[in-house]
Image: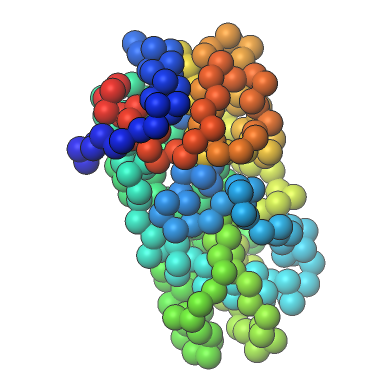
Amino acid sequence: METVATELSPELARGIDQVTDLLAGRQFAVLTGAGVSTDSGIPDYRGEGAPTRNPMTFQQFLSAESFSKRYWAGSHLGYRRFAAAAPNAGHFALADLERAGAANGVITQNVDGLHKQAGTRKVVDLHGAMDRVLCLTCGQVFARESVSARIEAANPWLDTEGAVEIAPDGDAIVTDIDSFVVPNCTVCGGRLKPDVVFFGEFIPAEKYREASALVRSSDALLIAGSSLVVNSGIRLLEEARRRRLPIVIVNRGVTKGDSRATVKLETGTTETLVELARRLA
């Protein structure tokens, strides 16, 4: 996708000049958070105006059928909205930067799959992806669409077209769940779970090693749309800092890594990534 220049404020233009000078001639890794997908209609967890949420933990999901029903009903409605979302110009700009050899790939905390849809080839989805479903008993992997079809067949009353409030993890608030039929594994009858990392669950070790390797093979780290509250993001930033790599953070609002950034731009990710791609790709 051809990157189109946008009109920038003088302050943002100066900031991007600084970032351009810093990243020019360097191959950088990119770490993205929910802020990259807000312009695709997917809300941010911690951005300005984001409501306070208490996501279900993995322990709760396993503890009782009522939690499993609530999660699957909400996750199904949320996934339908995710599936309808499209990459925004920021996603396409990152794909352009990778194709040009400026970026060596994207590590994302998002589960929406939009980086791959935009054309980025190397994507490390730290927190999993909503379009896959795992059996916790036998390990069978299912396409989310096949599980969604089963949910809708078993729960025809579920309003997939109505207005729902979704979250960045694909969950939605559903209160009437007593009659909800939870899908089970068609291979062994075991419990199914979307292939995403719940709160209270560890990121798979192989995923983190893949992300760490991407940072270690880079000359700089660009962080976009993440408040860095989640520990994995800070660990990757620390790897870059220990190697004395330039670190750029683009995010509206304070992040836990601001004091360790070489440059921090307090701005939206879309316009910044588009301009960086125009200059570096």
- Residue 45 is situated, as x and y percent measured from the top left of the image, at 62, 51
Where, by quadrant of the figure, is residue 58 drawn? Answer: bottom right
Q: How many marks?
A: 0
Viewer-side residue, 92 vs 77: 92
Viewer-side residue, 114 vs 124: 114
Left or right? Give the position of 278 relative to 165: left
Here the colouring is rainbow
Is the C terminus in the top left, top right, bottom left or bottom right quadrant? Answer: top left
Viewer-side residue, 174 vs 58: 174
What residue is drawn where x is 31% and y is 36%? 7
Residue located farthest toward the left when viewing the structure as drawn: 2
Left or right? Give the position of 82 relative to 183: left
In the image, residue 20 sits, relative to residue 128, either above or below, namely: above
Could one spot residue 109 in this view of the protein? yes
In the image, residue 79 sits, relative to residue 267, either above or below, namely: below
Residue located farthest toward the front when viewing the structure as drawn: 10
Left or right? Give the position of 190 relative to 150: right
- Residue 213 is situated, as x and y percent measured from the top left of the image, at 51, 23
Viewer-side residue, 10 vs 232: 10
What residue is drawn where x is 54% and y is 61%? 170
Where, by quadrant of the figure, is residue 139 drawn? Answer: bottom right
In the image, residue 44 sits, relative to residue 15, either above or below, namely: below
What residue is drawn where x is 57% and y is 69%? 165
- Residue 109 is situated, as x and y percent measured from the top left of the image, at 55, 42
What residue is drawn where x is 33% and y is 21%? 102
In the image, residue 26 sits, relative to residue 110, either above or below, namely: above
Is the N terminus in the top left, top right, bottom left or bottom right quadrant? Answer: top left
Could one spot residue 107 in this view of the protein? no
- Residue 101 is situated, as x and y percent measured from the top left of the image, at 30, 22
Left or right? Give the position of 252 relative to 92: right
